[in-house]
Amino acid sequence: MAYVDPFLAHGIDISPEDQEILNRWQETQPAPEGCTIPCLMSFEDFMKYDGFISDFLRGFPGGESVLFWDTDDISAVVGYYYTGPLKGTVYMLHGPTDISPKFFSLARFADYYRRVIRDYTEDGDPNYETKFWDDIDFNDNQPMTEEETERFHLAAQELIRLWKAEDLREDWYINMGFCVCAVMPDCYAEELIPFISPKEDEYVLEVLCHKLVKAKCTKAVPALGKLAQAEKNGLRIGGWSDSWTARRTHGYLLQLALEKK
């Protein structure tokens, strides 16, 4: 029996390419010792997370997901979206409840896994735990392909529609905002400007600011100026009591805008 067979039998939709990656994982991926390294779970081990999935993940508007990896020592899992706008993407969940994609494909996650195992160690600085769970190189530092740009622009637009159209519970609302920022192609980042408002969730605002900096979205300067003033007046972006996120973002993008003139 192939690794994916019991998952498929329970209605989990996995593309043929991803089935091949999963079925060959044990023979193609190195397996060094380390309590924080993601380990591929059996279907039986995955089912032990059913309560967690029911409480936190099932019904999430971005898509249903399955957990394929966990670790021996820390509370951390790797999830794979198999339905919805985020289908085929991979998230890594440890600590804060952020289920936004960290990789646009399972193949990209596999490449990253191999690179971390090759370039880092269990007790180095940074170590396995840092690179797998805390300081992840988003999408293995690879830009979107042209096909991905088209696909994820549409996905981001659908996520925005679901994000704002539904009365979501708080953790899902925040995660939908995170997901929008994760998959929106940088070249379309100006479509996020309407959400730069002091009324938006403070954790979403922090991720929005980071996204706009990454995308070098100078068109956001006017809206960020207003947000920076609200922050100066006491708005706690990201929950920080001494937040400077909006002001730094505004200053950086304003300088870029001036340099373009």
Image (cartoon, rainbow, N blue to C red):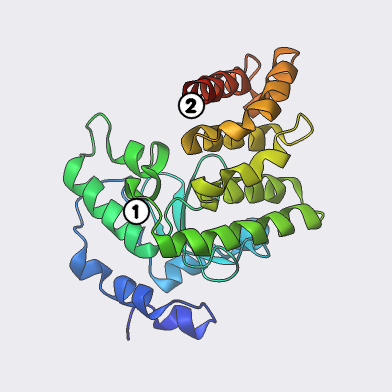
Name the residue that disc number 2 marks. Answer: 260
- Crowding near the residue tagged with mark 2, few <14, some 14–19, many ≥20 C-alpha atoms within 10 Å: few
**Residue 77 rendering spot, x and y as whole percentages:** 45, 53
Answer yes or no: is residue 102 visible.
yes
**Residue 109 rendering spot, x and y as whole percentages:** 35, 57
Q: In which quarter of the image is the N terminus?
A: bottom left
**Residue 191 rendering spot, x and y as whole percentages:** 64, 46
**Residue 188 rendering spot, x and y as whole percentages:** 56, 48
Residue farthest to the front, as pictured: 261
- Crowding near the residue tagged with mark 1, few <14, some 14–19, many ≥20 C-alpha atoms within 10 Å: many
Give the amino acid type for the residue marked by disc 1 in the picture: Pro
Q: Label 2 vs label 1: CA separation?
A: 44 Å
Disc 2 or 1, which lies upstream in sequence? 1
Q: In this view, does 24 lie to the left or right of 205?
A: left
Secondary structure beneath label 1: loop
* In front of the other: 211 or 147: 147
Answer yes or no: is residue 166 visible.
no
Q: Is residue 162 left or right of residue 71?
A: right
Give the amino acid type for the residue marked by disc 2 in the picture: Lys
Name the residue that disc number 1 marks. Answer: 38
Q: Quadrant of residue 39?
A: bottom left
Q: Is residue 253 left or right of residue 27?
A: right
Secondary structure beneath label 2: helix
